Image (cartoon, helix red, strand yellow):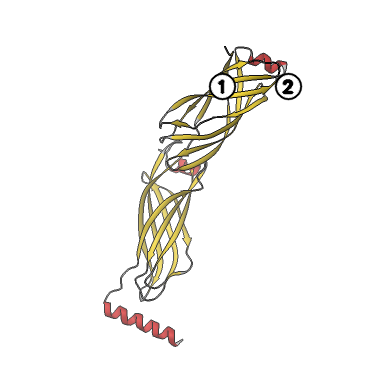
Amino acid sequence: MVKKVCLLSSVAFWVAGCGTVSQPGVTVTGARLQDFTLESLTLVFDLEVENPYPVPLPLADVDYSLASSGACFLSGTMPVQGSVPARQKKVIPLPAKVVYASLFKTVRSVKPGAVVPYEAEMGLSADLPALGRRRLPIRKDGQFPVPVPPELQVQDVAWKIGLKETRGTMYLKTINRNQFAVNIKKLQAAFEVGGVDIGCSGIESPIGLAANGGEATTPVFLAVEGSKLGLGVLGVITGKGGAYRLKGAAEVETPFGLISFPIDSPGQASFRRAR
C-alpha cells in the first residue's frame, strides 16, 4: 500500500512538473495477410504502443472500421488485456477478417479477381495517468486481393492406343482473370471421360500467368491402364471428342501469398490419335 501511494505521488509530481501529460505513441508497424482463401482473408495490423510514463499503461480495447470507395465494409471492437510496462513499447496484433461475399454486397464496385484499396480507421483505448481513459486514433491505408482460380480448359487430347496401356497428351489452357499475376506452382487432377476416371496427372513445371487475362497452353501427359478403358470410353477417346471433367487441387503463388484451391472443371474437348 505504501509503495502504491508513493508511486501515485511520483506520478502526480511528474504531471505537475511537466505541466501537460504527453500522449502515448501508437503506430502501425505492419499489415499482413493471414488465412488467405477463396472465401475470405484476415488482415492483421501490428499496433506498436509506446508508454512514455514512469508507470505501466493499462490497455482497454481497440475499435476499427475498414472502408473502400467511401463504403464501410467491416467494423468491430477487440478487447485488449494487460498493460505496457513503464517507458517501454508493446506490439498489439489486431486481426480483421474480410469475407468476400459480404464485401461484394457492401462495395458494389468490387468484383472477383480485383485488388481492393482500403482505409482503416482504428482507435486504441487506454487509461492515462491523471487523465483517465482516452482513445488514441490510428490510420492505415493498404490493399488486399479478392482472388479467383485460374480457368482450366482442355483444348484437345492426342491419344496413342495400346493393348496394355494407352497414353495421352492433354493440351491444357490456363487463363488468369485476376488483376495480379499468378504462378501455378502445383496442379494435380483426375481426368474423367464419360463419367469414368481414366487417369491422374499434373503439370511438370510451374505455369506463370500475367494479370488481366494472361494465358498459357501446357502439355500434360496421361498414362491409362488398358483395364480402365471399357468399350464406351474407348469409343469416346477414339472419336472426334466428348465431355470431360478435371477434378483435383492446385497451389498458386500470388504477390499476396500462396493460395490452394480445389479443381472441378467440366468441358468439351476434341480427341485425336497421336501421330
Which residue is identified by label 2? Answer: 227
Name the residue at 40% across, 31% down: 212
Q: Position of residue 164 (x, y in %)?
A: 70, 19
Which residue is identified by label 1? Answer: 170
Nearer the observer, 166 or 170: 166
Question: Based on the displayed image, in which of its 4 quarters is residue 269 positioned?
Answer: top right
Question: Based on the displayed image, in which of its 4 quarters is residue 229 positioned?
Answer: top right
In the image, is 237 to the left or to the right of 68?
A: right
Label 2 crowd bin: few (<14), some (14–19), many (20+), radius 10 Å: few
For the C terminus, which image quadrant?
A: top right
Mark sitting earlier along the chain (2/1): 1
Q: CA distance from mark 2 to mark 1?
A: 20 Å
Name the residue at 42% across, 28% down: 214
Q: Position of residue 176 (x, y in %)?
A: 45, 30
Q: Position of residue 238 (x, y in %)?
A: 64, 13
Circle 2/circle 1 CB separation < 8 Å: no
Q: Position of residue 231 (x, y in %)?
A: 72, 15
Disc 2 is placed on an element classified as: helix
Q: Amino acid at mark 2?
A: Ser
Q: Is residue 168 above or below residue 18?
A: above
Name the residue at 72% across, 18% down: 230
Label 1 crowd bin: few (<14), some (14–19), many (20+), radius 10 Å: many
Q: Amino acid at mark 1?
A: Met
